Image: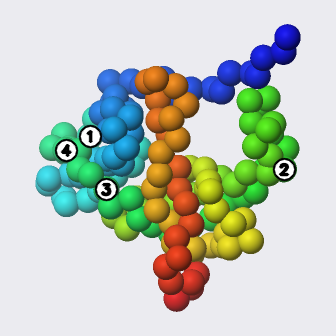
Amino acid sequence: MSSSPLRPQPQPTAETERYWQAARENRLEIQYCRVCARHQFYPRRFCTQCLSDQIEWVQASGRGRVYTYTVCHIAGHPAFESHVPYAIAMIELDEGVRMLAGIVDSDMERLAVGAPVQVCFERISDEIALPMFRLTGGDSPGA
């Protein structure tokens, strides 16, 4: 009997636990600096712009655009072999931060730099839900 390889899972840390907790609840949270009014991602203990420790967590809109992307035709890990081809994209959220995520449930023919996206969540274990993105029917790229 063969079993599928286990999918690699992120290991939450003190800095990222709040992010993963929100994702388990189907919410995308990012950090916001109360001193310089700047959002940031990935989670850190201080603001990378002004070095303040006055960081708070805020719910992101979950909307953004594809900044760049690649379509993987060779699985990066044995657990992804059944998903080939799959797309990985750098998403620029409306809040101005960028995050790397998979593109799911979308027509890959529509995938383009500037394409509008909306967050969704893929539960990969009892403890981890991954923020992923779907293409939306919004403005065309470059508009």
Q: CA distance from mark 3 to mark 2?
A: 31 Å
Asked which secondary structure carries label 1, the reply is loop
Q: Residue at x 19, y 40 (%)?
A: 53
* Type of the residue with mark 1: Phe
Q: Depth-wise, is mark 3 or mark 4 nearer the camera?
A: 3
Q: Quadrant of residue 44?
A: top left
Q: Give 139 or 1, whichever is nearer the viewer.
A: 1
- Residue 136 image point, x, y percent: 52, 70
Q: Residue at x 81, y 36 (%)?
A: 81
Q: Residue furthest bottom?
A: 143
Vertical placement of residue 26 versus 24, above or below? below
Q: CA distance from mark 4 to mark 2?
A: 39 Å
Q: Is residue 79 visible?
A: yes
Q: Give 89 or 1, whichever is nearer the viewer.
A: 1
* Type of the residue with mark 4: Glu
Q: Residue at x 19, y 59 (%)?
A: 36
Q: CA distance from mark 2 to mark 1?
A: 38 Å
Residue under label 3, please give it: 60
Q: Is residue 51 visible?
A: no
Q: Depth-wise, is mark 2 or mark 1 nearer the camera?
A: 2
